[in-house]
Each structure stands twice: as structure tokens, then as C-alpha cells.
Amino acid sequence: MNSRFVPDVATRIEPLPRKPSAAIVTASYAPDFERCRLLCETMDRHVTGVARHYILVEHRDMALFRQLEDSRRTIVDERDLLPRWLRAFKDPLSLFRRRVWLSLRTQPLRGWHVQQLRRIAIAARVGEDVLVFCDSDVAFLKPFDASAFWRDGKVRLFRRDGVLANDGHDEHRIWSRNAGWALGIDPVKVSPHDYISTLIAWRRETVNAMCGQIEKMHDRDWVSVVGSARKFSECIIYGRYVDDVLEGAGHFHDSAGFCRIHWKGEALSDDEFRRFVGAMAPEQVAIGMQSFIGTDVGRIRRLIELD
């Protein structure tokens, strides 16, 4: 195994086609089905410039999510994305309420870990030039064209500069350190940047090159490498690959988020929700209400006047 990666691929990053193709990718699961339905409806109402919407789910959720499938929306079984040796089981430690993914090649993984693996793996199965990642608890409120994610042959890389140098981001720093290890980046080179958000874009060819480099560094498949540490972020792995390995080739940076997110706390009252929406920045076209907060989907529908 190589002890250190020498970035030798940056010069091979070709400009995007003049009119690149784009797909939106959403990883979801059964408890988020109604939220995902709302996402689909608001996408169909407001989003343009996208060739297809891929929804990535566990095998047992396929029948449920196929209700959302149409001529431009495809439901993808994780069995078609991830190796068969990574299998889902009911977790006895949660009285069989939760799922755990087990293998001899990774740590025990939860659903949120495996959703990240699906988002990476889809790049090897589709043909669109640009993959736009959007969580299933997002709803679009304004018109949005996917062309906002590219310019002059480059893809927009969401990056908040210097954030990890501040206090209060211990877990993100661990994710960044583990990303560096997976990519073979010199551990002395610590990144201060954060790349995590929803409604962000990756270049498909760059994702596949990233997986290839992980495998080259560790002499085994990328899923077992990434899954060998339970603390990881697919967004940070991709961001560090682009910035620390490719030296930014094929991308331009932007810190403006297109989605206003209610990350934590309690469900918003009607008035709080209206104030939340009213405080959207000009560039923000969608809202994200984290599903674990428990905001009722029916209330969201009513408040955004979808029903």
C-alpha cells in the first residue's frame, strides 16, 4: 500500500460540456417517505435543468418508494449500489426498532452511514455529468435552475472556509481527519474547511476518480475503507479530494447555501415557521426541516400552500 498519495490526476480534469446533464440524488428511507413525497412535488413545481431524480433506498423500502417513480424519477435499490457483503439487519440493541448494517470489512453502520455510501456509489451507475444532492426533508419554495451549479466548465463546490478552526466543531474535525486518512493525504495537512450542506453538487467523474484513489491507496474497495471508521462525512471526503488532491481542478468555491435549514431544536409553531421562511436569503430557494425534529409534514404542506 502506498504510504502517501501524489496528486497526479488534476491535469486530466476536462471542462464540463457546454450544457452538462444533471441529476438530483436523494437518499431516503421509509420513515421519511411523506417528506420525500413533498420534496418530489415541490421539485416538479419549481426545479428545472435536471434530467432525472434518483431516490436511493434500502431493498425493503423499494415497493413503498416506487409510488414516486415516473418518467423522470427512478427508485434505486441499495443492493444495486453497494457490495453484497454489507447487509442490513434488525438491531436487537434497539429492541429491533432500528437497522444496523454488518460485515467483516467495516464497523457496524447505521442508516445515516449507509445513506452516505449510497450517495457516493450512485456515481458509478449513472451517466449525468453533475450530481446534485438533496435530502428528503427538503422542500423547494422558489424557482430554481440546476445551471446554478456550474459555470465556465466547472462545478460549484460548497465550502465554508476556516470553519473547522473554530471551537465547537470537534466531530467535523474527526470526519475531516478520517477523510484525509481514506484519501492518503499527509496527516500533517489539516483542512480548516467545512463542505457539509444539502443541495450541493459533485462532478460524477470526480466521484469515481475519488473512489479509485481510495482503492489505490488501501488496496481494497472504497466501501470497506470508508466504512472502517464510523465517523465520516461523504461531503468532507469529496471536498478534501477536490481541494487537497486535485488542488481544486474542475471546481469553483462558493459558501452560499441554497437551502435554509432548521438543524436542531423543537418543531416550529406556525408563526415561527412563517418567520423562518421570511428570513430566507435571496439565494435560498428551499427549506430543510430536519426530520428528527418532528415537524408534521401536513403542517408544512399547509404552510407552504401546497394543499
Image: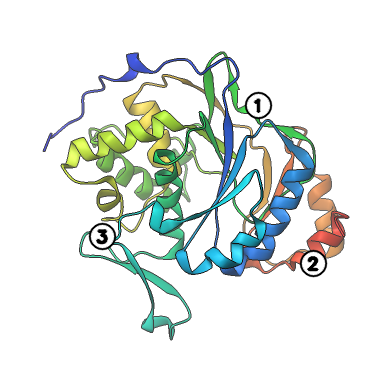
Find disc 1 in the rendering and name its residue.
148
Q: Amino acid at mark 2?
A: Gly
Q: Residue at x 19, y 46 (%)?
A: 220
* Mark 2 Cα shell of 10 Å, populated few (<14), some (14-19), many (≥20): few
Find disc 2 in the rendering and name its residue.
298
Find disc 3 in the rendering and name its residue.
106
SS assignment at label 1: helix
* Mark 3 Cα shell of 10 Å, populated few (<14), some (14-19), many (≥20): some
Q: Amino acid at mark 3?
A: Thr
Q: Kindly report the distance in space between the C-alpha atoms of the residues bearing marks 1 and 3.
A: 37 Å
How far from the left and from the top, in percent, is residue 268? 76, 63
Is residue 170 in sight in this rendering?
no
Q: Residue at x 60, y 60 (%)?
A: 66
Q: Is residue 186 above or below residue 104?
A: above
**Quarter of the figure with residue 192:** top left
Could you tell which of marks 1 and 2 lies nearer the N-terminus?
Answer: 1
Image quadrant holding the C terminus, namely bottom right
Is residue 35 in sight in this rendering?
yes
Q: Which mark is residue 168?
A: none
Q: Residue at x 28, y 32 (%)?
A: 189
Could you tell which of marks 1 and 3 lies nearer the N-terminus?
Answer: 3
Compared across the picture, whether 229 is left or right of 3 comes to right
Could you tell which of marks 3 and 2 lies nearer the N-terminus?
Answer: 3
How far from the left and from the top, in percent, is residue 156? 55, 26
Mark 1 and 2 residues: CB-CB less than 8 Å, in contact? Answer: no
Q: Residue at x 70, y 52 (%)?
A: 39
SS assignment at label 3: loop
SS assignment at label 2: helix
How far from the left and from the top, in percent, is residue 160? 53, 34
Image quadrant holding the N terminus, namely top left
**Quarter of the figure with residue 68:** bottom right
